[in-house]
Amino acid sequence: MIFLSYVLKQNTPTYGDRNRFEIIKKNAISKGDIANDSFMSTTVHIGTHIDMPYHFYDNGQTIEDFDPKFWVFENPLIVEITPKDLIIKDELIAKLSDIKDNGFDILIIKTGICHIRDEKRFWSENYGFHPDIYDFLIDKFPKVRVFGFDSISVSSFTDRLLGREAHKRFLNPEKPLLLLEDMDLRNIDEKSTFGKIIVAPLRISDCDGLPCTIMGFPND
């Protein structure tokens, strides 16, 4: 098994550099307390996380609307691309057009931006995905439930208006394609194959986004 998600840290990058993940130690053995006890302060849209339809729709689904089987993926498709621009569209559609649907249930895109996650441009000049990709995916790969990638958001910080439209298109409650953002794809490429991928979001009631642990089971 390998992890396809990052550990949350105080220096975890966030979209627009707006938020921070904080661990606040309320009790510490080193200060004479009986046990260590920590509180955390964070946005839920941080690190490897999944956007729920409720993120952009008041009537959108939350974690309670998905059963455990939803989060187990047994037919992943991994694609690696070299983006031409910060908004990804034609090059991804062209590559996916040549792939025969095999009942894929999760699509994971590696852009390579994961390799500069410690740099400012990871969040300030991140790759985004054009809203029209949603329409292509639900037609070409109708069984895909989650769209994952190594960029910090489906929305490029350089074009937030288009990014909002992308969020709304993918998270449409009528037929949502959930967004799995900021995946750790440093150690895999499109030649990597997995027999199973498990996405394990925090189960927080009435929440619009959820940090995730992702475990991949490579094929022998």
Image (cartoon, grey):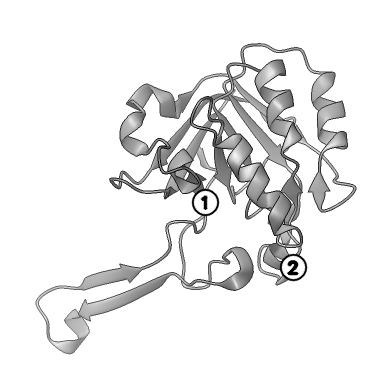
Direction right: furthest residue: 84
Mark 1 Cα-neighbour bin, 10 Å: few <14, some 14–19, many ≥20: many
Provide residue 102's location: percent of width, then percent of height.
67, 11
Q: Residue furthest left?
A: 34
Which three-letter amino acid code belongs to the residue tagged 1? Thr
List the residue tagged with mark 1.
Answer: 48
Of callouts 1 and 2, the N-terminal one: 1
On the rendered structure, is 24 left or right of 211?
Answer: left
Image coordinates of residue 96 in percent, x first then y, are 79, 24
Identify the residue shown where x is 58% and y is 47%.
Answer: 181
177 in relation to 10, above or below: above
Q: Which residue is mark 2?
A: 121
Q: Residue at x 68, y 31 (%)?
A: 134
The vertical placement of 219 against 20, above or below, is above
Q: Residue at left 53%, top 30%? A: 176
At x 47%, y 39%, the residue is 53
Answer whether residue 1 is visible to the viewer in this image.
no
Q: Position of residue 90 (x, y in %)?
A: 87, 35
Are the two marked residues, 1 and 2, in contact with CB atoms closer than 8 angstroms?
Answer: no
Q: Quadrant of residue 69?
A: top left
Left or right of 203, for residue 71: right
SS of the residue under disc 1 = loop
Residue 190 image-quadrant placement = top right
| SS for dot 2 | helix
Foreground residue among 174 and 14: 174
Q: Is residue 102 above or below residue 157?
A: above
